Amino acid sequence: MPTEATRRRLLQLWERPQSVWGWLATVDHKEIGKRYLVTAFAFLVVGGVEAILIRTQLARPDQVVLSPEAYNQIFTMHGITMIFWYASPILSGFANYLIPLMGGMRDMAYPRLNAFSYWTFLASGLFVYTSPILGQAPHGGWFAYVPYTNPVYSPGLNMDFYALALLFLTISTTAGAINFITTILRLRAPGMSIARMPLFFFSSLTVSASILFALPALTVACVFLELDRQWGTHFFDTTHGGSALLWQQLFWFFGHPWVYVIFLPATGMVSMILPTFARRPIVGYAFVAFSTVLTGLVGFGVWIHHMFATGEPQMAMSFFSAASMTIAIFSTVQVFAWVATLVEGTPVLTAAMLYAVGFLVIFVVGGLSGVATAVIPLDWQLTDTYFVVAHLHYVLVGANVFPVFAAFYYWLPKITGRMLSERLGRWSFWVMFAGFNLTFFPMHIAGMLGMPRRIYTYSSASGWGGWNLTETAGTYLLTAGILISLVALVRSLRGPAAGADPWQAPTLEWHTSSPPAVYGDLVVPLVSTGLPLWDEFDEERDPRGDRALDDQRAGVVTSVLDAEPLGIAKMADDTLTPLLLAAGLTVVFGALLVKAMWIALLALAFSLAVAAAWLWPEPERRAA
Amino acid sequence: MTMFIATEATLFVCLFFAYYYLGHLAPAWPPEPPEWHFAAAMLAVLLASSAVLHWGERRAERRLVSQARASVMVTVAMGVAFLGLQTVEYRHHLERLRPSSNAYGSILYTITSVHAVHVALGVLMLLFVAALPDITDAPKPPHRPLHNVAIIGISSTRCGS
């Protein structure tokens, strides 16, 4: 039975010092999760400002609000900010915060690595954002096709910032992936078998595995790009035996799985939110789980659909076209499961639920335009037009941004302990929904009328002016919707207290207080179903207090499939080493940018020394 | 640790993909027949070093600590020997072909350099393990430094050969 003594010991073990050192050295997953959320949201706002600038420039034909070079830099920064520094990290933020709480664990498997992932994410984002200050932001699009981005056509530092910032970010992302896989597979509460774990775990696991196998292709691509640009190599230089298409092959082998990394965890969150507000378990849990994993797997077999117009052999392209249509099946199965849950349940339309339903509508439209472009002859008509811009925003905003807002309205009360205004949430949703569709639906039409992508202006003779003006108006409306949510967030800080389980939800994170204690839950629960709070679970019948683990910072290691307890995992204490290592790597990448190789080497040596200090055995914190 | 190896292995898979992709565009690939002497010697050294380290890990499991430590130092020496051989080979080769000569030079030197960097990092990891006060698994699993550095070394050598 948990006692006051247990609580005191746990606090003593897990509390972090309320000092500057404590703030910098914390490895608490809740703290790191919050930082990810705040930082990624900040990047969303910055990316949104870039979007507003883009749409303002494109509102009327023949405008020069932005020069061509400025436009190129802004639309490139919009793309990389959203895709790299917002979309995936925001999901890491939710995953970081929620996975230990949902899984009955006290922290992630590798707490210091967790802190390191955050610091390197922040550092790489700041690194890439020093480029606009110098007027040399990346300008080759988020996809950075050669030969435009080679040293002949892009002689400045712009694309060096791009390559190095991405190399830096991949370190963060890979570390995070390793952490999530180990945590989800080995630290789930006893009894939380594979078939009982939250669907969010399935999606986090899938994308973490995707990250491990997709990111190296980007690493290789960026290394080659940087070598070609600064060190005289010829990987992409057709005049010396290289290949411009090599860039595209490597980039899209990474790039396609990446878009699943961006949306699968978000849809995993929807799979948690919908059942709560439909007041019933999700329909087809196994179907959703399998579809998630299959999407991740088959996602590695479709990348050529980004290259249908590059002259690849027809046989090869047909295979990828078929795979691209097949992969839609898995998403469709998930959509059917979600819709069935709504139909079979008794939906309660809270703000979070509205965003979840809005996601369903928008995502289906995006999926349809995607399946359309999987058909090669149609893609040849529509590639590089605004039709594709419409498609990608419908799936990315639909399947990432709307679920993220749903997640904020759903879980922010757990994180802050305060409820958000439902009224403001509903207003925010409808304004965002209207604004989004007004912005992006006309792009389908503009694309079919021939408007190309990636242009800074267009002539008045084109006839596209009306559509573009509508789209820009939609952008301002979408922005207003987001601002309403920001107001809701600020006002919620003095809002009504949330209590542990304001939504009467089924999963374990709602068993903790709001906000949770620093040690998570008082006892490690023993789980017997997939919906612990709606069914039964044994969190207190622990006569010897074994499962409280209140004598050391530790978690219970359980078996992969059945979550049978196997042992204890010691969990690391607060330390500055992750921050110091991130700082060392920042200097390495900064030095590489300006080719100060001795400084790079020194910084690397420093980083290795910090890594050695990190790994050196040290005494553990024990409870009195 | 296995996941880290998997992602690094994928890195090399992508490098080899680039090698063969560039190759399929060329009339002849490699453009000139490579010399095998250095490569064979380096491969032998690396394979042998794997065997030595594996032996050392078995000794550590049986708590024969000084023998385990000795094997780590021998492996370090062999890793350094590998890098020494590579340096000599590079000096030799760079006179005829540079990374900036053509795509073949670029990919060849990049793959071999990335590999050398990994060998160097492996040597540093081995030195770290050698400096640890306790290299057996006994008192504090799940930290298994000797095992970790061994599986990196051994599995990468298996793939590399």
Image (cartoon, rainbow, N blue to C red):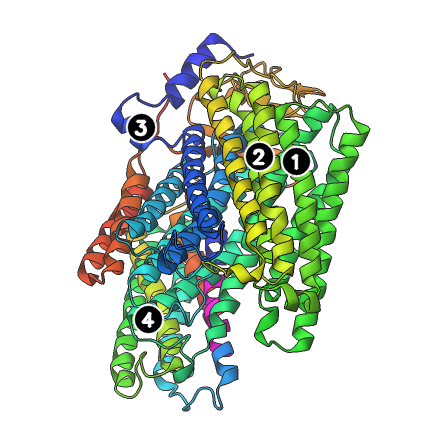
- Residue that label 2 marks: A432
Q: Left or right: where does residue A117 sit relative to residue A204?
A: left
- Residue that label 4 marks: A151
Residue at the right extreme of this rendering: A344
In whole angstroms, how far apart are the C-alphas of marks 3 and 4? 42 Å
Precedes in sequence: disc 3 or disc 4:
3
Q: Of circles 3 and 1, which is in front?
A: 1
Q: Position of residue A191 (x, y in %)?
A: 65, 30
In whole angstroms, how far apart are the C-alphas of marks 2 and 3? 35 Å
Residue type, numbered disc 4 = Pro
Q: Are marks 4 and 2 on the same chain?
A: yes
Q: Left or right: where does residue A391 sit relative to residue A548?
A: right
Quarter holding the N terminus of chain A is top right
- Mark 1: few, some, or many residues within 10 Å (few <14, many ≥20)? many
Task: Kindly identify which numbered label has been placed on residue A23.
Answer: 3
Q: Are marks 3 and 4 in contact (CB under 8 Å)?
A: no
Precedes in sequence: disc 3 or disc 1:
3
Residue type, numbered disc 1 = Gly
A487 up-or-down from A144: above or below: above
Foreground residue among A75 and A242: A75
Q: Are marks 1 and 4 on the same chain?
A: yes
Majority secondary structure of the magenta segment? helix
